[in-house]
Image (tube, rainbow, N blue to C red):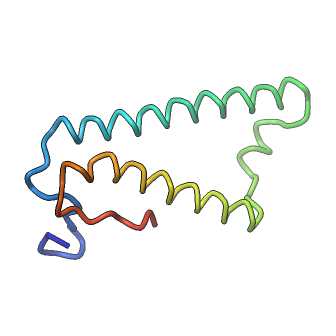
Amino acid sequence: MPGHAQDHPRYLDSAIDVDTLYRMLLEVTSELSVTRDRLILVESLLVDKGLLDDASIELAAFAPETAARLDRERKLLVSRLAASVQDSAPGAVVPDGG
């Protein structure tokens, strides 16, 4: 991996251009926007139907199988984001998503 310190790794070749990084940022922003919209919708529906209250949301914890699924999806997202710049950075190291 290019870079000189473990606490400051460099994932991208220094030749990467700003447009490529901006494209990656837009991908992250798009994912976040859709996720937030859906989360707010689901929470509102559950609260409106009396199936859940705000305190329950704050105190909830994921079951192990759900946590594992979320971990897989998180890694997939990181891989997709890294792939969005990989073509422009031939020496790039794709993080494992963890």
* Occupied quadrant, residue 93: bottom left
Give the position of the N terminus as an image quadrant.
bottom left
Find the residue positioned furthest to the left.
Answer: 15
The image shows residue 21 at horizontal and vertical percentages of 23, 41
- Whole-percent x, y for residue 82 in the image: 34, 53
**What residue lies at 18% left-to-right and 54% top-to-bottom?**
89
| Residue at 18% from the left image edge and 59% from the top image edge | 90
Q: Is residue 31 left or right of residue 93?
A: right
- How many marks overall? 0
Residue 15 versus residue 5 in the image, above or below: above
Asked whether, in this view, residue 75 is left or right of residue 93, the answer is right
In depth, the one of 78 and 45 nearer the eye is: 78
Residue 47 vs residue 70, the one in the foreground? 70
Vertical side of 29 occupied by 13: above or below: below
Q: Quadrant of residue 20?
A: top left
Q: Quadrant of residue 18?
A: top left
Q: Residue furthest top?
A: 48
Check the image and report above or below for 53 versus 5: above
